[in-house]
Amino acid sequence: MTQSDLQELKRLIHQLSDLGAAEALMSWDQETQMPPEAARVRGLQMASLAGLSHQMFTSARLGELLSNAAAETDQDAALLRVVRRDHGKATRLPIEFVEERSRAENEAHHAWVAARQNNDFASFAPYLEKMFELARRYADYQGYDDHPYDALLDDYEPGMKTAHVKAIFADLRDRTLPLLRRIAAAPDATDYSVLTRSFPAEAQRSFAAQVAQDAFGLLPAFSRLDVSAHPFQTNFSRDDLRITTRFDEHYFPMSLFGTWHESGHAMYEHGVSAALERTPLSRGASLGVHESQSRMFENLLGRSRPFWQRYFPAFAQAAPTVAQGQDAESLYRAVNRVRPDLIRVEADEVTYNFHIMLRFELELALLEGSLKVADLPEAWNARMQEFLGVTPPNDAEGVLQDIHWSAGLVGYFPTYTLGNLLSVQLLDAARQDAEIAAEVERAEYGKLRAWLVQNVHQYGRSRTPAEITEAATGKPLSADAYVAYLYAKYEDIYGLK
Amino acid sequence: MTQSDLQELKRLIHQLSDLGAAEALMSWDQETQMPPEAARVRGLQMASLAGLSHQMFTSARLGELLSNAAAETDQDAALLRVVRRDHGKATRLPIEFVEERSRAENEAHHAWVAARQNNDFASFAPYLEKMFELARRYADYQGYDDHPYDALLDDYEPGMKTAHVKAIFADLRDRTLPLLRRIAAAPDATDYSVLTRSFPAEAQRSFAAQVAQDAFGLLPAFSRLDVSAHPFQTNFSRDDLRITTRFDEHYFPMSLFGTWHESGHAMYEHGVSAALERTPLSRGASLGVHESQSRMFENLLGRSRPFWQRYFPAFAQAAPTVAQGQDAESLYRAVNRVRPDLIRVEADEVTYNFHIMLRFELELALLEGSLKVADLPEAWNARMQEFLGVTPPNDAEGVLQDIHWSAGLVGYFPTYTLGNLLSVQLLDAARQDAEIAAEVERAEYGKLRAWLVQNVHQYGRSRTPAEITEAATGKPLSADAYVAYLYAKYEDIYGLK
């Protein structure tokens, strides 16, 4: 490979990255700014640019340049490794399969929306069967050693294996269930009605954004907060971060913790080294590592006692009606309520992972064929009863609640729990530094954020999740830290010590 | 050419159109939404996508498909005609010239910003010389019959010739100057202080947007109004129109007439036939025809007596401080003040075109070499004195006031006046229909807008400006209608009849 070949390869990689940024901007605009009647043509435009990206990425010329390329620096080596990996995945799929899947996902999404609305699982079942059939075929195209689920999981959590997830989840379940049983049996005098008191949207927005800025470093100089139906984070460079939230005047935790959650995702992207800019390395290493950052801000810090001690006065000023008769401790307890319930996205730190373990087990069974789609609602409800002691009154609040499967996202759910586990493992490692620990006890996070940039963010996708985890925490990912965190926090709150 | 060749050509044309939409969105976002620190990478991304567009548009494959293509429908024939025309212009330029021009424009823009700030023409002069040298070379690459300016003008006003502009402008000048002299000598009892009374930005925005909706049909279902430093209209499809404005609490005409001006541009794009969607035909026919639509809403309608009679009550409600002691007639007179002054963008309907004629004459002289850049300020000031009887106190308020030349836009200015002339010629033609005339007298514009869609908008770029003008008005473009309009309106306002 000549010098000019490497330059041509990098130019193509930059063009693809820039095209990706444009597609992401179109998507952000669609969710936050676009006038409604623009939707039809915008859909055509986005599909067309996705096609152009795919065409450029799978072109013979790019393949040739990739084959011949030889890295001269570590950074180039990482770039080639990741682009080859992505390129391999893209080129192993026949174009007919990509088109069939795209059509099927579109149909399944519409079927899911209608089925959830009408609480009619049977109408969605054929589409769901198709999604799992496509997932199996996808795994066959990509290849795998142990389990077809490995090929799916790898797209979201590179290098993670199904067997490892199974082992971690079993351990987590066995050690968390006893705690959950004890919490459920404990007396609870906390007044949760405070969570539903009136807190006007504009004041919620202002408080959430101010804390995101002061505590978590998300400055308006390189970010925006907008409103969308479903909150998300996206970005078009490390200095162009866009997060969204939504407001319920009578349930402020949604916008507050949602904003801080998305701030965690955004600050991860902000911390990726500028040297990786406009390449596919300039993103988080995996969904799990990403979730570790969002959950850290949302839960480990945003739902901590020192945080509420520090921010209660500002909160009281922003929401005098809510704060009436409350103090930092009562707010801290209210926002940490543990309650086994039906809906994943509203679940607390103790019960959340059971929602994930349930989905993971069902995905495996569906993929292996040991469970039929027709029997899925029954299997769902049985596990809900087993894990959380509740049974959905209908499928809309049960098996139909998530969008993921209708969008073809099989193998995605485990990353939520892997992120939860990693969040505590990372925070524990950071707190080995006494100065960081002291700051966190005062709800100051400047040194912690610097540690995260140094040990996690800067690498982007140039290191694998396992490499990052082991270098930053000194051990592979496990449930240990998270379980210890849950016991310490909730035995205290529920007076179980 | 086979059927599949035509399909491939159309697919490429759609991809290029969609890429153009993405670039336009990046630009809109940059001006209205983007956090400031994102600017550097956004600049790289936009340059990169512009390069990709150019590369795709000038590819050998597209050229081959275009050469072989044979149209089967009138619409395909128009598409091929316009794409071949654009393709010819793009491929006649050596890539080295495109790159040299791009660099020089970038440097000239920075030099202009500094020169205007420091009122230092001499520092800008070498860059301006380069811009005119590049314009001459551009004309040579494109070729021309009569005058190199023809090649420049054609980019903004396809088919228009320099000789034609000269003749129209001479006629306009000779017939307008006497009116201007009489106005300047007339007594004027209007109280213009009303224009600078306080009108809070949010109330200006609300009133401007409501009128844009009610009077001009710019509905939120397919449009947005945002704030930017320099107002503009852009769009990503006919149902995705974005206009911007800016606010001065002590000079409401800026935002009001600015919003209605951009509404005119937007409604033109909205009226282009959906059959032309995602092709280069799906835009206005020329800058002049575009300006005829913006000027019609801004001036012919927005500054008309029936308009202020109809909207004065709503105005008074939105701006009680401004309306205090005023009525429809006094507002009508205030917003139609004629005053020879230095700055083009603030000029009224009578003096505006003199600013354009001056620039047109200077562009020709610079291009021909009969005027040296070093002598430009003197030539500028002399003509200002000759036409408008005012002399700029400095170059910042004189020859340095416009961004155009620093951006390489030579041949662009005449389209502003061509648009003014066409606006009246079109409105006169529409008012031949008695129902339209009656509606316009009541400041109702539904039938007028339908006429504009039918006679102007729907064709997009599939007809030339001359074809549209002659079919819609029965005659070629001239100064006749505009001159008659000025005399009727301003003899009345200034009591000169």
Image (cartoon, coloured by chain):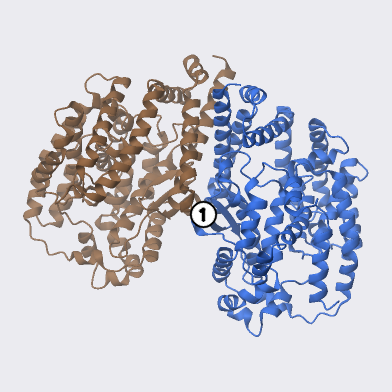
Chain colours: A brown, B blue
Position in image of residue A81 (x %, y %): 41, 22
Q: Nearer the viewer, residue A254 or B36?
A: A254
Q: For residue B200, which quarter of the picture?
A: bottom right
**In this view of the protein, can residue A278 be seen by the observer?**
no
x, y percent for residue A285 = 36, 34
Q: Is residue B378 left or right of residue A284?
A: right
The residue drawn where x is 86% and y is 54% is: B169
Residue type, mark 1 in image: Phe
In the displayed orientation, state which residue is furthest to the bottom.
B325
Q: Residue furthest front?
A: B434
Mark 1 surroundings within 10 Å by alpha-carbon count, few (fewer than 14), some (14 through 19), many (20 or more): some
The spot of residue A45 in percent (x, y) is 50, 39
Name the outermost residue toward the right: B370
Asked whether the viewer can see residue A367, the reply is yes
The answer to which image quadrant residue A178 occupies is top left
Position of A262 relative to B295 (above/below): above
How far across and down, in percent of the image, does residue B405 sit?
Answer: 77, 47
In the displayed structure, B307 sits above or below A411; it is below
Residue drawn 54% across and 68% down?
B206
- Residue B175 falls in which quadrant of the image? bottom right
Front in this rendered view, residue B268 or A355: B268
The residue that disc 1 covers is B222
The chain that hosts pointer 1 is B
SS at badge 1? helix
Q: Residue at x 86, y 53 (%)?
A: B168
**Residue visible at 15% across and 54% down in the picture:** A339
Q: From the image, which quarter does the N terminus of chain A lie in?
A: top right
Position of residue A119 in the picture relative to residue B389 (left or right): left
How many numbered marks does the figure carry? 1
